[in-house]
Image (cartoon, rainbow, N blue to C red):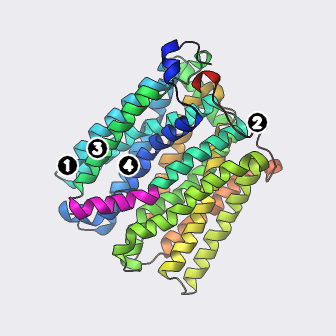
Amino acid sequence: MFEHAHSETAIRRPGTREMTALLALLMALNAFAIDAMIPALPDIGSTLSVVEDNRTQLVVIAYFLGFGSTQLMWGPLADRFGRKPILATGIALYGIFGLLCAAAPTFPLLILGRFAMGASAAVTRVLVVSMVRDLFEAEAMAKVMSLVFMTFMLVPVLAPLVGQGILLVAPWRAIFVVLALYAGAMLAWSWLRLPETLHPEFRRTLHWRAMTRAMWDTLRERQSIGYTLAMTVTFAGLVAYISSIQQIVFEVFHAPQLIGLVFAAIAAPMALASYGNSRIVGRFGLRRVGHISALLLVIVTITHVAIALTGHETLPAFVVMQGLTMFCFAFTSSNFGTLAMEHMAPIAGTASSVQGVINTLGSAVIGFAIGQAFNGTALPYLFGIAICSTLGFIIVALTEPRKLFARLGGRRLAQEPALPEDMC
């Protein structure tokens, strides 16, 4: 597959396990940059003279907006010049802007730096998905993507605790320094060990007509756009959660000292679900697992609204119901993302970019709107995530009405995905 590579680089290429871990930790740059900041939001607001508590949500939302703003750039560049050099560029910029955030003297400059961090980190979202698509297909792709997401999902369990731990010994600015150091470590590892996964025959020109045609192909392919839109509204619920959880724990349940544990308890089921998906998707198929989990997500979120409306909401009940929500979300996101990319192999970089822009910007805007509706109770968030989950399932049903709950998502491959021989 990689005949253009030198034989000496083939010796350094990782096996499947290292490749999966590397890709997962690259994606985790984003989760860490978002979730480690949550315990620090009150301190940031106090230090930088932010009067209105809801405004501190911009520290999270600005990152998401930046994350969605550049994906149309990273994808075509990676389709033209290869995955590896473009990835290295984005990671390096992420580290630089992280250090700039650490030194930001005002809140607007911090928000600008967060936007730039997200814009740089978008390279990992685009290229991790593209590289998995370069190497795998159908259920095998979903299995590897689930393993990537499993490691990725462990970061939200640890990141708030890490952020809280840093705050015990240093100011909030130190969190950005740690993020920059993490970026430096990933830059070194990926540069030394990551192979070039772009197929020579799929290398594309940067001519605007070719780029426009690839983008249009992504948008007009029914499965691609349908699952992208479903992912967008579903993911908006997760953005709303990340934006609102600090205020919910602090102001609704009056337990600021538990923010790290609450976040970990809710995020842990996501990692468990991602691992579970990697074990069962080959047996039951992308569509059946993805569609059932989407339906269960609707049921769980509506049930949570009902519990809150009856006045029986407590912090333990909130944690349990949100844990179930994130459990269903992990199954849904892994398979919907794979189904959106299923027919996009020749334009994987550009397709991943287009889908990522729609997903990230759309979910950021919707999630921010839900977060800004916070009124001292959890109800605006709970109603918002229930509506998003329901819309996501409806979009899937309209996209593939004849394949709803179908057993297989595509040609069934071997249960254990393997990298090409020259990568093992």
Q: CA distance from mark 4 to mark 2?
A: 37 Å
- Circle 4 residue: 63
Q: Majority secondary structure of the magenta segment?
A: helix
Q: Which residue is mark 3?
A: 98
Residue 93 position (above or below residue 52) = above
For badge 4, the amino acid type reads Tyr
Marks 3 and 1: which is nearer the front? 3
How far apart are labels 4 and 3 at the CA level?
A: 11 Å
The image's mark for residue 104 is 1
Distance between mark 1 and mark 2 Cα atoms: 50 Å
User: Which region is colored magenta?
Assistant: 156-171
Q: CA distance from mark 1 to mark 4?
A: 15 Å
Residue under the image location 47 percent in, 47 percent down: 361
Which of the marked residues, 3 or 1, is nearer the chain's N terminus? 3
Residue ID at (62%, 48%):
334
CB-based contact (under 8 Å), mark 3 and mark 2: no
Residue 232: x percent and y percent? 57, 51
- Which of labels 3 and 2 is toward the front? 2
Q: Is residue 241 magenta?
A: no
- Residue 252 drawn above or below residue 242: below
Q: Earlier in the sequence, mark 1 or mark 4?
A: 4
Say whether residue 266 is left or right of residue 58.
right
The Cα–Cα distance between marks 3 and 2, rounded to whole angstroms, is: 41 Å
Which residue bears the numbered disc 2? Answer: 413
Amino acid found under the numbered disc labelled 2: Leu
Q: Which residue is drawn at the image coordinates 23% and 52% (left, top)?
A: 174
Q: Amino acid at mark 3?
A: Gly
In terms of sequence position, does the residue under pointer 1 or pointer 2 come before the other? Answer: 1
Q: Nearer the viewer, residue 176 or 66?
A: 176
In what element is the residue under mark 2?
A: loop
